[in-house]
Each structure stands twice: as structure tokens, then as C-alpha cells.
Amino acid sequence: MGIAPSSMKAAALPLWRGPAVGFEQPFEMLEACHERVQRTLALLQRLCLHLRERGCDEDARQAARDVLRYFDQAAPLHHEDEERHVFPPLLEGGDAPTVALVHRLQREHGEMAADWARARLPLMGLAEGRLTGFGGYDEALFEHFAACYAGHIEMEERLAYPPTRGLLPAPAQAAMGQEMAARRGARPR
């Protein structure tokens, strides 16, 4: 049994399989993306354990490729969704604490992108066969990356998505979903 779940295999969208959620429900899609982030970070954690217990094998290299694919392709699209559709209404219509929250979330997007640039290097080495394991520094990078995402997701889902949803009428949410789908080369259902 491998460490990469079958749901991490090729999909029409970068690592996306969400039959119950479509782009016509953009906030549910954003939350489903967060679930995917958490599953991919769990895969990264299992990969580290696998390497320590069993060493490097094709399952490990494939898991590294799956994590790379998600955070290289799908995660930036998700952040762009938020930058384009969630944050602007809050910046325009929010009170001072809400605006401060949005600035913090935007700053965290940049910090997570920088953290990913560092964290992807050992994963790339493993995926390409140049490395056979991770050192303590690498695992600390992964842990920091996962912890940043956990706090970030919690704030977005609890403090950013609900008020944005309330500010956007149904036609604006429909346009949001269509734009999200178009950037991914997909059609809404």
C-alpha cells in the first residue's frame, strides 16, 4: 500500500476532485480547496514518516510529486481567488479590524509563497531522485509551512468568508465562480 491516496492521481483540474462542489458555489469551492490543502499537508507529514521508517522508494517520490503539484499549481490559484474575490469587498466595505485582517491575510499569502519556495526544494530533490530523505531542517520547514496554513485557513473560514459572502449578491457570486472556473480552464456545471 502506497502513501499517496488515489485521489491524488491526475484530475481535470490540478489535484481537484470535488464532485459535490462546483464553481457555481464559489465559497464552498474555496472551503473544499482548504480541505485539499489540509489533505496535502497530511500527505507531506506521512511522507516524512515513510522516509524515516521505510526509506526512499517510488511511493515516496510519487508523494513528493503530488505535494509539489498541489502547492505549485492549485494553491496559487486558490490564493488568487481570494485576492480577486474575497479580499476586495472586505477592504471596500469593512471596518478597521476587518481591513486589518485582510492586510494580515494578504501578507500571509506572501509569506506562505516564500515558505513554499524554500520547502519545495527538498521535495523536488526527492521527486527527481537527487535526495533519498529529508533532514531536520527540511522537516522543520514543512512543519512551519503546515502551521502557517492551519492558522490562515481558520481565520479565512471564520472571519473572512462569511462577511464576504454576505456582501456579494447572488449574481456577483455567480460571476466569481465563472471567473474561478475560467482561470482553471474549466466550465462551471
Image (tube, grey):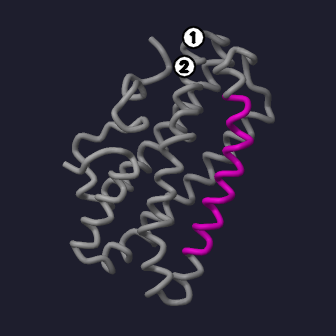
Displayed quadrant of residue 56:
top right
Residue at 39% across, 26% down = 10
Q: Residues within 10 Å of mark 2 (few under 14, many from 20)?
A: many
Q: Is 112 covered by the magenta stretch?
A: yes
Label 1, on which residue? 58
Q: Is residue 1 left or right of residue 187?
A: right
Name the residue nearer the viewer: 34 or 106: 106
Mark 1 lies on a secondary structure that is helix
Displayed quadrant of residue 123:
top right
Quote the CA–CA distance across marks 1 and 2.
6 Å
Label 2, on which residue? 62
Q: Is 167 covered by the magenta stretch?
A: no
Q: Is residue 26 left or right of residue 189?
A: right
**Mark 1 touching mark 2, by CB under 8 A?**
yes
Residue at 36% across, 49% down = 32
- Residue type at tag 2: Gln
Name the residue nearer the viewer: 169 or 57: 169
Name the residue nearer the viewer: 163 or 158: 163
Residue at 43% across, 69% down = 86
Q: Is residue 64 above or below residue 137?
A: above
- Residue type at tag 1: Glu
Q: Which residues are magenta?
A: 102-123
Mark 2 lies on a secondary structure that is helix
Q: Is residue 62 left or right of residue 122?
A: left
